Amino acid sequence: MTPDRGAAVPGLRERKKERTRQALSDAAVALFLERGFDSVSVAEVAAAAEVSKPTLFRYFPAKEDLVLHRFADHEDESARVVAEGRRAGTAPLDALYAHLLDGLARRDPVTGLCDHPSVLSYLRLLYGTPALVGRLHAYRVRSEEALADALAAGPEGAGDPLLARLAAGQVVTVLRVLAEENTGRIAGGETADEVAEGAVEAAGLAFRALREGLPY
């Protein structure tokens, strides 16, 4: 992800922490993919990464977070897209739609339109482990809250927090459903290139529904 233009550039210490965090996550995911999430202990992850358990827990409060770290940069992504769009004079839904289309074109794994073997293995681990699915729900709640705050900060809803929450809930759900549709088709044997055209059409349909209201 490209950082917010208004955000401070991380210092050396923060960059070192992020490299350590990434290394710990990578070591853990490799073990989980090999043996299963529930069959690997935190102590084994720490040993594989050559750190102590207390050190590991300083970076990741829960075992599930070692896997969900790959989503960490995306947690407030929609909120950042809205904020950056406003600075460029772009309406929130237009900015989010353009960002989604760009993600589909780049085969961003978050869009579900990615058939790289490592990504597919990771998704099988994620969605095949109940504890990780539960943790993912918490991530989505925080993503929705961040987006609601970003929407409420603009003039579109006259600062109405309830309207912002309703809108954020719809956007987050739309992005989730679209990604699940793409993931499901690829899991069924189609390639990302075969799914791409339909994914773009589905994105257009979904965002028209967001703008105009559902026809039910």
Image (cartoon, rainbow, N blue to C red):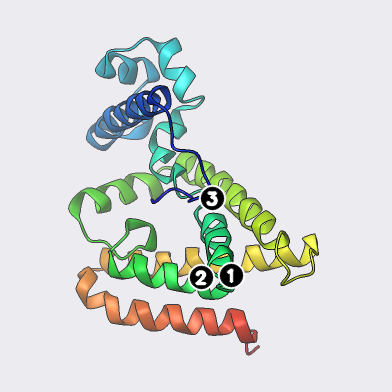
Kind of residue at badge 3: Asp
Earlier residue among tags 3 and 2: 3
Kind of residue at badge 2: Ala
Judging by the rendered image, the residue that carries numbered circle 3 is: 76
The residue sitting at 40% across, 32% down in the picture is 66
Judging by the rendered image, the residue that carries numbered circle 2 is: 95
Mark 2: secondary structure: helix
Proximity of marks 1 and 2: CB atoms separated by less than 8 Å: yes
Of 112 and 159, the residue lying toward us: 159
**Picture coordinates of residue 209 (x, y %)?**
57, 83
Q: How far apart, in angstroms, are the residues tagged by discs 1 and 2?
A: 5 Å
Rate crowding at label 3 as few (under 14), some (14 to 19) or many (20 or more) other CA atoms within 10 Å. Answer: some
Judging by the rendered image, the residue that carries numbered circle 1 is: 92
Against 199, is 11 above or below? Answer: above
Mark 1: secondary structure: helix
- Quadrant of the snapshot with the C terminus: bottom right
Kind of residue at badge 1: Pro
Residue 123 falls left or right of residue 97:
left
